[in-house]
Amino acid sequence: MTQKTGQRKWDLRKKMADISTEIAGVKFETCVFNAAGPADVTLKELEVIGKSKSSAITMKSCTLEPRKGNPEPRYADLEFGSINSMGLPNLGYKAYVKFSKIVKEKYAKPVVASISGMTLEDNIVIFKAFNDSPVDLIEFNPGSPNTIGKPIVGYDFQEMDRLLETVSKICKKPWGVKLPAYFDFVHYDQIAKVIKKYPVKFLTSVNSVGNGLVIDPNKEKTVIKPKGGFGGIGGRYIKYTALANVRKFYELLGRKIQIIGVGGVYTGVDAFEFILAGASAIQIGTAFLQKGPVIFAKAQKELLDFMEKKGYKNIEDVRGKLKTIN
Ligand code: SIN
């Protein structure tokens, strides 16, 4: 390489925006990675995420015992997203403790465990086990919308208080909480008050929007089987709700707690909007399932291009800087 070409390459590199991020002191090469849920149950699936451009490997929310999940059909692609009532099919926490060691050694990226114990006692056992694992972060998912017979725990503020108090006593890793979507400003205030009491490092907002109902008008039937057809809605349908949640939590807790935005991200510009709203990182769920692992490289490139076009150097230049109309 001549000196001139080398210099030109260096100048180009200098111009590239930096979309790396840091969550609870853990460095991520870019701010875009996979959400807990889709295609992250088996070691084979985690290896696919490891080999992709996803900046982290987030593992499926795990329970004490392995779970088969809800009866099929339990997932359907929709025009603008998805509906699912998976019911937390997973291999049980011991498998993910083991997988975390394997993928951590093989891939140079953070590994995120997601914990979704069915009871307080289950959560204690699982959190303790991950204390002795190489996972970088733990995302506590206190309530999937799809567990038959269980309410969405994130809407029960007293129960959330009890759970977070326990987790804060036992968890030795940096940890955060995955939240359902809230819709009322009073509820944001109530859950923020609970979260503020504990050493929560990050919020992941939002889980799929619970208990939607999709109907096939020709068959005059629901499109999924569990719970009479009710399931969590994901994808583009929920982007605006997710952005609102990220924004509101950024306003209420942004000085103390980082926010990972998730819900309807298909493009780098979607990711940019989440950063503007206040997100420090972005997870991709439904779009990963629908488009495959190439979605991560695509969204990252589009985010880089968009930031460069606008003259931003890094995500801190953008984060939370949303303007409103006065
Ligand atoms: C599921 O497995 O039911 C989805 C996971 C979640 O909604 O948290």
Image: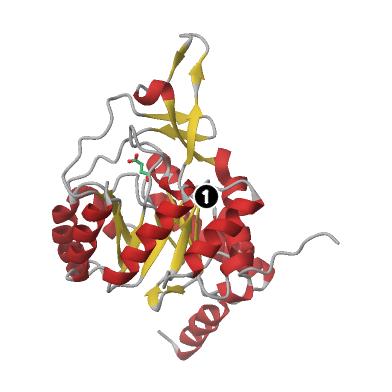
Residue at the image position 53 percent from the left and 47 percent from the top = 181
Ligand 1 quarter of the rendering:
top left
Q: Nearer the viewer, residue 123 or 13?
A: 123
Residue 153 in view (yes/no): yes
Q: Amino acid at mark 1?
A: Val
Residue at the image position 35 percent from the left and 21 percent from the top = 225
The x, y position of residue 274, in whole percent, is 58, 59
Task: Indicate the quadrant where residue 314 lies.
Answer: bottom right
The x, y position of residue 182, in whole percent, is 57, 48
Residue 54 in view (yes/no): no
* Disc 1 crowd, CA 10 A, few/some/many (<14, 14-19, 20+): many
The reply, left or right, for residue 213 in relation to residue 87 is right
Q: Is residue 306 above or below residue 91?
A: below
The x, y position of residue 297, in whole percent, is 43, 57
Residue at the image position 40 percent from the left and 39 percent from the top = 151
Q: Is residue 101 above or below residue 287?
A: below
Query: Where's the N terminus, which quadrant?
Result: bottom left
Q: How is the image coloured?
A: secondary structure
Determine which residue is flagged by label 1.
265
The reply, left or right, for residue 117 in relation to residue 213 is left
Residue labelled 1 has its Cβ within 8 Å of some atom of ligand 1? no
Q: Nearer the viewer, residue 91 or 21?
A: 91
The x, y position of residue 135, in whole percent, is 25, 68
Q: Is residue 186 above or below residue 173?
A: above
